[in-house]
Image (cartoon, rainbow, N blue to C red):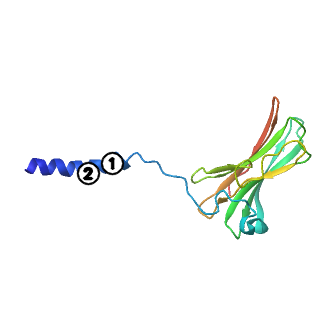
Amino acid sequence: MKNLMKKASTLLFILPLLFFGNMKANAEDHSYDGKSPYYNDCASSATTKATSYLINEKNEKIGVVELKFSSTCKTAWAKITMNNNVPSGFEANAEVTRNTDKKRFSCDSAGGNGKVVAGQKSCYTPMVYDLDPRTSYAFGKYYGPNYNIWATTGSF
């Protein structure tokens, strides 16, 4: 009987480890994650917290990537703005990434306004909740046939 009780208590200790020991931490899920910066008027309190320039082979600034932050909504998002309309065959896109859980959205994600295509100059991503201790950064790229320029902002 003593042996049976010992085996049962060992099994009760091991079973939860088998079922829950390999579970991975999920990404954070906040109500503002994935929403447009214009949701609840978040964009109206936006400031640019970090910038990085897209530099071409002639060392010219051809666009800028911004990490935007809403002080009202405590959210961050990315925006890319090219100096000129994008020509046919080229595109630009931006991404925002929350550092704590690596949740990432691009301009193409629901809540963004779509990547920059021929004739356009800018796009923005959906938001990620970014209240301290969370931080985020923005990434932007301009690309076409055999051509790729990118820039990453610092984290805020």
The answer, for residue 80, to whether it is visible in the render is no
Using a 10 Å C-alpha cutoff, classify the residue at mark 2 as few (fewer than 14 neighbours), some (14 to 19) or many (20 or more).
few
* Res 135 label: none
Residue at left 73%, top 50%? 153
Which amino acid type is marked by label 1?
Leu
* Secondary structure state at the residue bearing disc 2: helix
Using a 10 Å C-alpha cutoff, classify the residue at mark 1 as few (fewer than 14 neighbours), some (14 to 19) or many (20 or more).
few
The outermost residue toward the front is 110
Q: Mark 2 points at which residue?
A: 13
Q: In which quarter of the image is the C terminus?
A: bottom right
Locate residue 30, reporting x and y percent: 59, 61
Q: Do the residues labelled 2 and 1 touch (CB within 8 Å)?
A: yes
Locate residue 69, reporting x and y percent: 72, 62
- Would residue 67 appear left or right of 58 to someone viewing this image? left
* Secondary structure state at the residue bearing disc 1: helix
* Res 17 label: 1
